[in-house]
Structures are given as C-alpha cells and as structure tokens.
Amino acid sequence: MIKKELRIKYKALRNAMSFDEIEEQSLAIANQLLKLNIWNKTYFHLFLSIEEHKEIQTEYILQILAGKDKEVVVSKSNFDDCSMTQYLLTDNTRLKKNEYDIPEPVDGIEVPDTKIDVVFVPLLAFDTKGHRTGYGKGFYDRFLANCREDVIKIGLSFFEAEESIDDIHSNDMVLDYCITPKEIYRF
C-alpha cells in the first residue's frame, strides 16, 4: 500500500477504537517498553498525544520516565517550515494546545536535537522493514535527521506491521523498534 492509502485505513481503524480500548492498549505499549534495553539512556523525546486523533496515550510512558528519573524532552512545531524545537519538560513547563490540538510547551529550556538519546515516534502505520507513515508533513523525518546517528528511534502503534510501504522516500527515517500492545519489532 502507498502512504495515502495507509493514512486513510489507519485513521479509520483508530477512530473506531473506544476510549477504553485506547487506554488499555496504551498501557500495554508502555509495559512492552519496559522490556527494551534503553533505560541506561538519559534524554528521552516523547510526543504528547493528540486526544482528538485518538493517538496512543503517552502519559503512561511519561510516568515510567519520571519514575526512572529521566530527562523528558517535548517539542513545539513550526508549521511554516515543518520543523520542531525541543524543550525540557519540567514541573514548571506550561503546555498549551496549538491550532492542530497538539499539546506544546509555551516556553522553557531548549534542548539541542543532538542531546537526545531516545525518540518515541508517533505514526499511523509501519512496515516489517521499519518504515513508517505519519501525517505526511515530514516533521519527524526532519527532526530525526538532525539527531545523532546513534539516536534510538522507537515507533508506537496500536496495530501490527504492514508487509510493505510502497512509496518510501530517501529522506524517510527508518525506526530501530516499533512497539505494539502485543509485539516488539526490531529493525
């Protein structure tokens, strides 16, 4: 399937999920993450869920990161150039939803992309080779290209892998892992 078809398919599948299913499966994904050998790292980038799009609820992951005393980094999107600026999430960080309902920091301490060790990557679909399909603006591909080469890229998905995404581009970043409620995919 091509990305456009995958976006339609997986948006519909997510929209069909109840809020109870989203909560249950988000918790299962967070529990799967505990099995990964990533917890010796320090800086973790976490996307904040767009509830209106029925995304994975990342607050469970946030609780794990806080419990392990990790530095959590969140982003603010610039829709003019499809870039993201990273900020340290602290007790004093004020969050506000932007015009696309993405919770973002109002201000705070900026963190360079090269400081981040692990990135939890949002997606709509992924394939068995570690390619992903997002919303189509390339925010995460641009961001990941600016990170260190050894950054660990972890996709989070309610659904299992597609066999193949047919229209991969040279600037599409490949995941290292993708976590679903039932599986840990390694690429």
Image: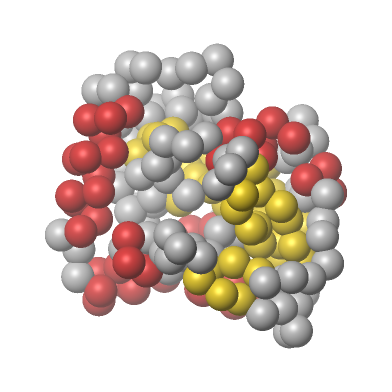
Location of residue 86 (image quadrant): bottom right
Residue 22 is situated, as x and y percent measured from the top left of the image, at 30, 68
Q: Is residue 142 above or below residue 170?
A: below
Work out whether 187 lies above or below 18: above
Residue toward you, 83 or 182 = 83
Q: Residue at x 20, y 59 (%)?
A: 15
Question: Quadrant of the image for the N terminus?
Answer: top left
Q: In the displayed structure, does residue 174 sit left or right of residue 19?
A: right
183 or 89: nearer the viewer: 89
Percent x, y of residue 114: 82, 43
Q: Is residue 65 visible?
A: no
Q: In percent of the image, x 25 and y 76: which residue is there?
A: 20
Q: Depth check: 92 or 165 in front?
A: 92
Q: Is 121 situated left or right of 99 in this image?
A: right
Query: Is residue 74 something one can see in this rendering?
Result: yes
Indicate the position of residue 8 as horizontal and vertical percent values.
21, 40
**Left or right: where 125 falls relative to 81:** left
Q: Colour mode?
A: secondary structure
**Would residue 1 appear left or right of 106 to someone viewing this image?**
left
Tell how many labels: 0
Question: In the rendered image, which quarter is residue 34 located in?
Answer: bottom right
Which residue lies most toward the bottom here?
91
Q: Residue drawn at (37%, 60%), measured in percent from left and top? A: 55
Residue drawn 48% across the image and 59% down it: 32
x and y percentages locating residue 132 in the rendered image: 44, 34
Q: Depth check: give the residue in front, 112 or 66.
A: 112
